[in-house]
Image (cartoon, rainbow, N blue to C red):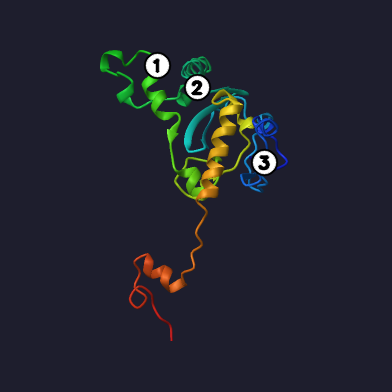
Amino acid sequence: MKILGKYKDYYDYLQGIYGVDPLLTFDRRYEDMLLRRPDEEAKDKLISKYLWVAGKRYSLYYYNGATYYTLDELNNLNDILTEKKQEQDHIRQPWKYSNWSWKSRNKKEILTQEWWDIQNAKPTNLNIKLRNPVLISTNTPRGTKEDYSPCILKQWDFHKVMSAEEAYKQISAMMGYFVDHPVIPNKQSNIEKLLSHGFDNKKSFRHRK
């Protein structure tokens, strides 16, 4: 895989080990790349991000310059938020994973392995849809292109999720998929596009004289 861009990521060095294939070019020369600047983050503000990498979605949390990903880390983070009296920022899970009951309503909720396994490495077609193997949510995703941005995984401590070797292989494999499945240009006329979406050219629009 050939990688282009001024920002270096933690798996880039593997180009020198696996070789550079010009047919698999990952162009990271983006103008809208979301860069993380921890020195500008509020000290007591919890930040959560979805990262969409090679067909799977991952959840990471950032607080006071530290990154939390594993189940133990997230439970420890909730302990820290409790000590800081920031219970409103707790990471929470749906009741069906909590074994919650009225008898235990005053007990501390512990995030469960079942919940964590389901929410992490969740398969998604977003990377294929937007033709980019590495994306990050800019806000709560609603499904539009504006909700996602390219990013450098190193800046978001993605090494806690995946080794450099695995990240390189998965991203390279998706670039290969893009090569094998190129975008087919839409050569329809404007009228044909309207008709293909169910509109009636005579009844759906007002015709001006």
Front residue (pair 105, 63): 63
Picture residue at 35% right of the left edge, 69% below the top:
199
The answer to whether one can see residue 87 in this image is yes
Callout 2: SS: loop
Write down the residue under mark 2. 86
Front residue (pair 108, 59): 59
The residue lying furthest to the right in this view is 6
Callout 3: SS: strand
Residue type of the residue flagged with mark 1: Ile
Write down the residue under mark 3. 3
Write down the residue under mark 1. 110
Considering only order in the chain, which callout, 3 or 1, is on the residue closer to the N terminus?
3
Binning the other alpha carbons within 10 Å of mark 1 as few (below 14), some (14 to 19) or many (20 upward) gives some
**Is mark 1 in CB contact (under 8 Å) with mark 3?**
no
Q: Nearer the viewer, mark 2 or mark 3?
A: 3
Picture residue at 30% right of the left edge, 13% below the top:
104
Residue type of the residue flagged with mark 3: Ile
Counting from the top left corner in percent of width and height, residue 44 is at 58, 24
Considering only order in the chain, which callout, 2 or 1, is on the residue closer to the N terminus?
2
Residue 107 quadrant: top left
Binning the other alpha carbons within 10 Å of mark 3 as few (below 14), some (14 to 19) or many (20 upward) gives some
The quarter of the rendered structure image containing the C terminus is bottom left
Residue 171 quadrant: top right
Residue type of the residue flagged with mark 2: Gln
Residue 81 lies, with reference to residue 15, above or below; the image says above
Callout 1: SS: loop
Front residue (pair 184, 198): 184
